[in-house]
Amino acid sequence: SLNKDNPPAPPPAALSYASDSLVYSSNPIIQHCCHSKSRPPGPQSSLNKDNPTMAEHDPFPMRSEEARRLADSVQHENDANPDSWHKMGTTVSQKVSMKSKGPSSEMNKESLVSKKSRSTKKNTADESIYDRDDLDEQQGRTNDSDEEDDEDGDDFIDAPLHNSRMLRDEDVMDLPRPLGGLVMCLQRCYFGTRGVAKRIHRRVYGDSFPWDDFVRTITLSSTLFVMIGGYWLLRSLKDPVLTALCGVSAIPKAKMLSVFVVLGVVAIYNHLLDEESGFRKEQLFYVFGTFYGFLFASIAYFLNHPTIGLANQVEDPSRILGWVSYCGIESFGSVMVSLFWSFANSNFNLKQAKRSYGMMVATAQLGSILGPTFVNKFGHTLGIPTCYMVGAGCMLTLQGTMWIYIKMFGAGDSASGEKVKAVKKDDEKKPKNKAGILEGIHLFMKHNYVKGIFAISCLFMVEVTIVDYTMKVLAREHFSDEFPCLPYNQETGEPMACWDVATNAPVGLSTEAIKAFTTFMGLFGQATNTLSFFLS
């Protein structure tokens, strides 16, 4: 109102300072509102020089009755100036520091942490794990362990933005129309199937088995499924191949030879499993999987050979291919299964193992049913070499499933390896004897309870081997009588390879008898593992 007719022009200094601070101007009201004690005083206009009290008092005081009652109810910092409640301060308060120091701040921090933990524990019983998982997924957190993470830091600030990974119609506009529609259709099918699976999972398991742990268990169980399925497929072919090449009397000798072969392979496995070898457990899957895949593929190839393979129906114990096939399958079942459980134990804690290992074993039993079922259904039509090649393909497939698990969930033993190294640093002063390759034999000779375990398992295997060998001898005699070896094939009239013209007697099984024996072994594995699955 004072400068209504002739407002004064601000001095150049005021303009230059305003261009820098963007606070001061020629208007005295703006100078008053933006004034700060912490800033260096800028140039004032002539009005401020004439009226110095204008910069200290509000030009528009609140004099209503409600304003006075509100002023009386406010606790002022400065009792000497009771009207300062309606003034806007521009200085940063120094009474509340960003980082408190002293024992009182530590006590406050501990009290806040304890209150947070108490509230968390209080809400845990009433809160569903699915709600917590959805909240963690939205905030980008992952719960790899069952214990709460007590690390310092702001959970909200540290959490990355949630990525739904959903494709929109605009994302596939650059693709051809049929291909883009197919991608969107597959995405809808995936998320729809995933939603149905999560609802079924929650109805079956409730809150006792989190969805993330369920997916992790299923992914790792696929490796055991392929491994056991391939092993039982090859195991159904093991005895028919050895019987056709070397005779049924070679089975007990091959059983004894396989013991020493398994000991040698296990010694190599233990050496590679040592930390000094530089191999991790998941890398051993690739090493042994590649080795056995190449071995079984080579055996499948030589089984088609006219003189080395099954086309030569003369039973001879000196035919090496039958021994290699038998010992290779036996060593695979001993080493690879132990390697899998060693890897699983390093990736699952006790609580996770209690709810996951049952599903893993059930999945493995399904594989042990499907492997012999394949031999029973297709062994007669496809032939033994083709079924053997399918078993070799399982060795490559289990490497793929393990690779998928590593990419999705990681190896899992990096943290445990750091803990082991930390423990080793603490125990460097205590000298310890290093475990060697023959550590199992040393433990057997030293501890009597290990001898007791050996006696129980040994007696069991002796009993099983005797009954199993008796069954195979009876099966061989049965199928040799049902499909006898004759000098000439009754359907084609051609001479049969299993008949020796010089002795005028059969020297092996006919082709139909070998196929029938193979089909029977597939049926035996299918029935045995199905019964085991329902009993377990």
Image (cartoon, rainbow, N blue to C red):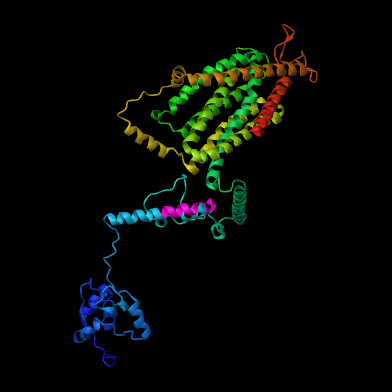
Q: Main secondary structure of the magenta part?
A: helix
**Residue that extends furthest to the left in the rendered view of this protein:** 49
Q: Which residues are magenta?
A: 116-130
Whether residue 372 is in magenta: the answer is no
Residue drawn at point x = 58 percent, y = 34 percent:
361
Residue 260 locus on image (x, y percent): 52, 17
- Vertical order, 28 against 134 (above or below): below
Does any portion of residue 58 appear in the rendered image?
A: yes
**Residue that extends furthest to the right in the rendered view of this protein:** 490
Residue drawn at point x = 61 percent, y = 54 percent:
188
- Vertical order, 480 against 174 (above or below): above
Report whether 462 appears left or right of 23.
right
**Residue that extends furthest to the top in the rendered view of this protein:** 503
Residue 245 locus on image (x, y percent): 64, 16
Report whether 424 appears left or right of 191.
left
- Vertical order, 85 against 273 (above or below): below
Does any portion of residue 374 appear in the rendered image?
A: no
Observer-nearest residue: 71 or 476? 71
The part of the image, by quadrant, that contains residue 313 is: top right
Quarter holding the N terminus? bottom left
Quarter holding the C terminus? top right
Whether residue 127 is in magenta: the answer is yes
The part of the image, by quadrant, that contains residue 487 is: top right
- Vertical order, 16 against 4 (above or below): above
Observer-nearest residue: 110 or 208? 110
Residue 459 locus on image (x, y percent): 58, 18
Residue 311 locus on image (x, y percent): 67, 19
Observer-nearest residue: 105 or 325? 105
